[in-house]
Amino acid sequence: MSTAAPASALPSYADALARYEPVIGLETHVELGTVSKMFCGCPTAFGAEPNTQVCPVCLGLPGALPVVNEAAVRFAVMIGLALHCDIASWCRFARKNYFYPDMPKNFQISQYDEPLCTDGWLDVEVDGEVHRVGITRVHMEEDTGKSLHVGGATGRIHGATHSLVDYNRAGIPLVEIVTEPDVRSPEVARAYVDELRELIRALDVSDVRMEQGSLRCDANVSLRRRPAPGEPDAPFGTRTETKNLNSLRSVERAVRYEISRQAGRLDDGERILQETRHFDEASGRTSPGRSKEEATDYRYFPEPDLTPLALPEQYVDELRAGLPELPAARRARLVAEHGYTGRDLTDMRNAGVLDLVEQTVAAGATPAAARKWWLNELARRAADAGSQPSELAISPADVARITVLVAGGELTDALARKVIDGVLAGEGTPDEVVAGRGLAVVADDGALTAAVDAAIAAAPDIAEKVRGGKVNAVGPLVGAVMKAMRGQADAASVRGLLLERLGAS
């Protein structure tokens, strides 16, 4: 088994790229959001007490027979269609045999030589350039249980004092999405997983929460020498497979490290071992797992307890016709309809507010105002509360109403934030909060005039500067008036009135 080279001995990433071309393929496992498991009726809720969502089928007890979950098949076909795949009119399940404690049957029901979906693609954009990533296959299988290694420092089996197994996850429906070795950089790898996650979320077939393991990525990385001008491409090198990457950042960092690590070994005349590897978030390095099996090691054979799937063409056509708007088409529409830039869309998507912004526009807000309040104010409040923006106790219709009040001069931005406070506190609709807290902008010219005159009288030196033509000096007077009005005046109107009273307008 190989050992990791010291970080100081590794060539830089740029130096590695100068001599070697990365060849990257990704295998992404997605837990489907079905109510029950793949081959039995056990529930699939995340976070249940260990070993409480199990039955004789998913525990592999003698005599228990599997039954295919139709919803899982439907979800898998939808994913395949969204990835432009060919959908098999006939396919079957196979047994993938291997022993591991989290495999209660000592085999996994999967698909091997006859997968459900093949030959697709997904376009991703990095720095304005579109990269087409080929999809080799999308196949169905069941998830394994989860091993918990206790007593060590890393949470892995090495150094642990004992291990526990939770079989709640065993049997949950999975699709595995396997790419062609088309990816050529860590940035494209990250962008692919990000776009795939958004696509699956749009289909509403999985929550794709990487932190909970409902989307996990394995990165296959190899290097080959860059050819001299006129030379043919070198053959692919030996690949490693870095397992169970559970964040976009980890995908990019793990691939980047593997490129440098493999380049260092090849520079030293050493060979790359075909093996699985683990990525450590703290160090940013990968470490050896086990030697990588070939398909023959799994002794695949057709699952004898399940009949083949034969999907009618009409069934597939109906699913194709019912697909929702997919992320790429949605982005193009939002740019055309609302004038958002690509950066705007990226920021809103990263903040988890894109859907909310669109719903707020539909409720009557302008695109710019909806983006401003969700991205700058409400996303921050959600982050402070450790929640998602969609979990805040304020609706897109509420936010739209607040933007209308601001645009109409009935609220300032500062007052609007107080209205948000009230809505989040359960004090009612924005209009009810405005009335209950007395937050409307004061439009009484007499009250404003009195406050303006008082501010001028209290600061004669500043007033004299403004009269002398230094209009920018009016700021402290504006602040004094706003304080006197408890923020319930429009700052621009206050400034205009001050300049008018001082003869500087």
Image (cartoon, rainbow, N blue to C red):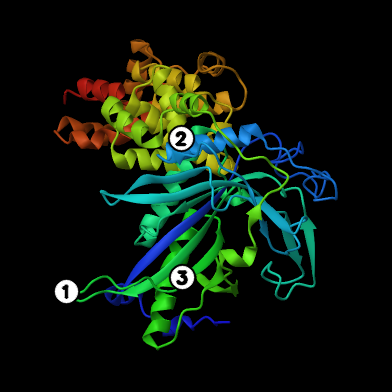
* Position above or below: 351 against 340: below
Kind of residue indicated by mark 1: Pro
Q: Earlier in the sequence, mark 1 or mark 2?
A: 1
Q: Earlier in the sequence, mark 3 or mark 2?
A: 3
- Check whether the beta carbons of the residues at disc 1 and disc 3 lie within 8 A of each other: no
Q: Nearer the viewer, mark 3 or mark 2?
A: 3
* Local SS, label 2: loop
Q: Would residue 240 be found to the left or right of residue 11 on screen?
A: right
Residue that numbered label 3 is attached to: 239
| Residue lying farthest to the left in this orientation | 469
- Image coordinates of residue 300 in percent, x first then y, are 63, 58
Residue that numbered label 1 is attached to: 229
User: Crowdedness of circle 2 by 10 Å Cα count: few (<14), some, many (20+)?
Assistant: many
Kind of residue indicated by mark 2: Val
Q: Nearer the viewer, mark 1 or mark 2?
A: 1
- Image coordinates of residue 488 in percent, x first then y, are 42, 21
Q: CA distance from mark 3 to mark 2?
A: 38 Å
Q: 83 or 499: which is nearer to us?
A: 83
The numbered dot on residue 353 is 2
